[in-house]
Amino acid sequence: MQKTTPTSTDERITVPWRRFIVCILIVAVGFNLRSVILAVPPVLPLIQQNLGLSYTATGFLTALPVLVLACIAWPSGLFIERVGSRTSVIIGLVLLASGTFLRALDPSAATLFLFTLLLSLGIALTQTTIPVLIRHWFPTQIGFVAALFSDGLIIGEAVAAGITVPIMLQLVGKDGWTSTFIFWGVPIVVLLILWLWLTPPAHTKSAARMPSVMHTPALETSTSDKLNTPPGKRPRVNAFHLGILIGGGSLIYFGMNGWIAPYNQAIHQAGLTSLTLAILNAAQLPVSLGVTLFAQWLAGRRVPFIIAGLICGPSITGWIFTPPGLEPLWAALLGGSSAFVFTLGIALPPLLALPHEVARLTGITVSLTYAVAFVGPFVGGELWDVLRIPAMAFLPVGVASLMLIILGMLLPSRARFGLESKPVQAKRTSGIL
């Protein structure tokens, strides 16, 4: 077997107060990664009017962060291996804060797109890095802490979408959309200071030039891995498998958000749109928070993904073939199921990969996840245009539901990764259990 250099010393956080503080910071990171994105749609009509943006340009502005995540998360994994995980979060937060503030200084179409690209780079780097740090800092609670990070992302979406316009109207007036960028930039600066102050310094960087994780056996690098899984018995970790699986849940979420309004307009049910969209998004939060309570036990299991697919498939079928008045019900099931997949999906790369593989596997998985989420709605639109059938816009959602079932069934079992075995009482060097 090819020899590798150990990639990190034991970086787990053992002091209770620091574990609590770092968990809070991880939630705050997730919150800020989404608040700066979801604060834009509520003021988008003002931006479009003031800057003279076309509908195409407006759509591209809202899709730009997702596109950057799809393109940049993969190389971000390689970058993390070079500079280290904690430092990568610092760089990501600096990019995020800089882009957020700079958008407000000289508002124009060109600067808006340029600095949205800049902050999106920060989002891609930071979101790729957090699972790597979870693997190093909380190796025995990966599922739980990854779920906390997901909670932060979803709470950030809900809060920013809900309070941006009231804050603007209360503080700066109905045309102060640039001030909302400053408002959501301040918490990022505070978070960056707290991150520098309170998170433990990394001992080492991830090793560079490690074997590919696209479809290779996980390699033995730590004593704990040898204890949990017999040599040569560890299953293969396929990044395409994980990326498309998690991407299926994201496609369902983005596909429904993108096509509910046009579809209802086409079938003359526009009055249902606001309620249905609100329920689709609101259903995510209680599901994410509920899953967090059981995330440590659920993480890495096949059944949750299969159940999500079994819920989404009939739900999208019901959406199309039942009376429009039932749309809020189907939206609640689809929104909740997509959050179920996303919350547990974040834990898969750090849970299934060995320490030296986590950064690269996470980067590839995140890129594929958002590539699927970005392409799916466009495919639905193309099908609608070609076939002239509004319901065809939701065909990718149905396909994604089926993929959740199939790819969920094909996930390697937790037992094969040594996640079900009891700790072995044996003499050991420092490692991650």
Image (tube, rainbow, N blue to C red):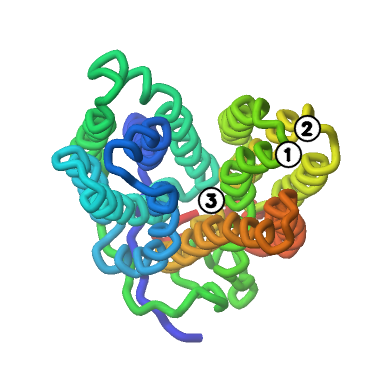
Three-letter residue code for mark 2: Pro
Which residue is drawn at the image coordinates 62% and 55% (left, top)? 419
The one nearer the camera, 99 or 293, is: 99
Marks 1, 2: nearer the viewer: 1
Three-letter residue code for mark 3: Ala
- Residue 378 higher or lower than 141, as above or below: below
The image quadrant that residue 84 belongs to is: bottom left
Marks 1, 3: nearer the viewer: 1
Q: Which mark is residue 220?
A: none
Which residue is drawn at the image coordinates 44% and 80% (left, top)? 211
Which residue is drawn at the image coordinates 76% and 45% (left, top)? 316
The one nearer the camera, 145 or 163, is: 163
- Judged from this view, the residue extending furthest toward the top is 170
Residue that label 1 marks: 267
Residue that label 3 marks: 347
Q: Disc 1 to disc 3, how far (Cα)? A: 40 Å
Q: Earlier in the sequence, mark 1 or mark 2?
A: 1
Crowding around mark 1 (Cα neighbors within 10 Å: few <14, some 14 to 19, many 20+) is few
The image quadrant that residue 198 belongs to is: top left
Q: Which mark is residue 324?
A: 2
- Residue 306 higher or lower than 26, as above or below: below
Which residue is drawn at the image coordinates 39% and 77% (left, top)? 210
Q: Disc 1 to disc 2, how far (Cα)? A: 9 Å
In x, y percent, where is residue 377? Answer: 59, 55
Q: Are marks 1 and 2 in contact (CB under 8 Å)?
A: yes
In x, y percent, where is residue 281? Answer: 57, 33
